[in-house]
Image (spheres, rainbow, N blue to C red):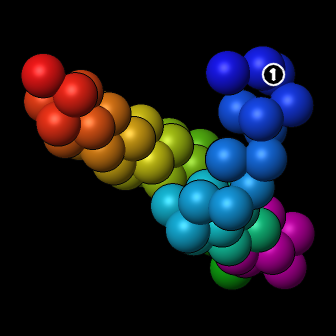
Amino acid sequence: MTLLEQFKKILRSRKFWVLVTALVGTLAAFLTSEISAWQALQAALAALAVYSTGVAIEDKGYGSQLR
């Protein structure tokens, strides 16, 4: 799979767009002083952790189907 194909796959992923939405929401809350920098960092790391876990679970399922 080429780099361009991988990039297209990511852009079609619902998990990716949920991550983007969470990060944009966190940034908006931070810029409007609704949350502190520490809370924004925690929210961003939580969103990235959820995305990473979701991708890992998806990859695990895909790998077991190939066997």
Q: Position of residue 31 (x, y in %)?
A: 87, 69
* Magenta stretch encompasses residue 32: yes
Q: Main secondary structure of the magenta part?
A: helix
* Magenta stretch encompasses residue 7: no
Depicted 41 relative to depicted 40: above or below: above
Foreground of the two, 24 or 8:
8
Depicted 7 relative to depicted 22: above or below: above
For image coordinates 76% across by 68% down, the residue present is 24
Residue count near mark 1 (Cα–Cα under 10 Å), binned few <14, some 14–19, many ≥20? few
Q: Is residue 22 left or right of residue 25?
A: left
User: Which quarter of the rendered picture does the C terminus lie within?
Assistant: top left
Q: Is residue 61 left or right of residue 44?
A: left
User: Which quarter of the rendered picture does the N terminus lie within?
Assistant: top right
Depicted 61 relative to depicted 27: above or below: above
**Quarter holding residue 59:** top left
Q: Position of residue 54 (x, y in %)?
A: 33, 48
Foreground of the two, 57 or 2:
2
SS category of the residue bearing label 1: helix
**Residue 53 visible in the displayed image:** no
**Quarter holding residue 33:** bottom right
Q: Position of residue 55 (x, y in %)?
A: 39, 41
Q: Is residue 53 left or right of residue 20?
A: left
Q: Which residue does the numbered mark 1 point to in the structure image?
A: 3
Q: From which residue to which does the magenta span run?
A: 25-33
**Quarter holding residue 65:** top left
For image coordinates 13% across by 30% down, the residue present is 64
Depicted 40 relative to depicted 64: above or below: below
For image coordinates 78% across by 47% down, the residue present is 8
For image coordinates 58% across by 49% down, the residue present is 44
**Residue 59 visible in the displayed image:** yes
Q: Is residue 41 left or right of residue 64?
A: right
Amino acid identity at mark 1: Leu
